Amino acid sequence: MTKLKTMQNFFQSTDTQISFFALIDEGDEALFTAVKQEGFQQYAGDDWILVFDIPKDILFSELNHVRLNVLYITLTIFLISIVASVFLARSISKPLDNLVNLSQVAKGKLGKRIVPKGHNEIITLSESFNFMIDSIRSQQELLEEKDELLQLKNLKREAELLEKQKEMIVSTRFSAIGELAARIAHDIKNPLSVIKTSNSNLKRIKDNPEAFEKAIGRIDRAIDRITH
């Protein structure tokens, strides 16, 4: 509805005031407000209509200014929140990292360290903890060196024990061989003595066939004992 048509309708209506947006020069909008003249007591009025307009950009300039301020404040608060969140996350993650390092140290991983950061008391405590870790690691390395030396000594002792056991086994075998040789010599000596005696008797009894046969039999039995 055009501005003229709106004003005509307003003039014909019983309304005393109306406001509407309409186009003005160069296509800009403005807020138009029309107010009918009213009489007072005996003065009935002249049926005038007071019309005034405010360009839309002027009307909303303050509101736009407020909107921009609200937008700037919102962006500022948002940026501050992001920065604060980052610092808060770091302040939380760093102690968590230190706690993880503490748990790793508790599991025997002495390569972890605590980063000294914060108040003087926390820095002092962190440095003391790192010093304790270094001391424990040094003691552990010393114990490992001693353990290696002990293992070497044990290996040397075991080698000496094995050597003695070998010597005892060899000595026992030689002793057994000596006993066996003595038994063999004894077993051979008796038949040889019989053979020697029988051989000596053969010279004396060669004219006695019966005695000669007996002597030959004893020699054969003695030889069988040696060969079997």
Image (spheres, rainbow, N blue to C red):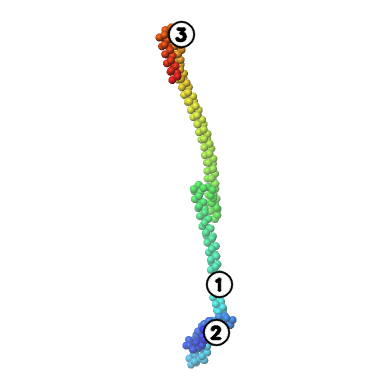
> In the displayed image of the protein, which residue is found farthest to the right?
26
Task: Confirm or deny contact between disc 2 and disc 1 (CB under 8 A).
Answer: no
Residue at left 44%, top 16%?
223
Position of 120 relative to 20 (above/below):
above
Q: What label sits on residue 78 in the rendered view?
A: none
Question: Which residue does the numbered mark 3 point to in the structure image?
Answer: 203
Residue at left 53%, top 81%?
21
For marks 2 and 3, give the one nearer the viewer.
3
Question: Which residue does the numbered mark 1 point to in the structure image?
Answer: 68
- Residue 195 x/y as whole percent: 45, 13
Question: Which residue does the numbered mark 2 point to in the structure image?
Answer: 52
Mark 3 residue crowding within 10 angstroms, few (<14) / some (14–19) / many (20+): few
- Residue 98 x/y as whole percent: 52, 53
Query: Which amino acid, mark 2?
Result: Phe
Residue at left 42%, top 10%?
212
Residue at left 52%, top 34%?
156
Distance between mark 2 and mark 3 Cα atoms: 180 Å
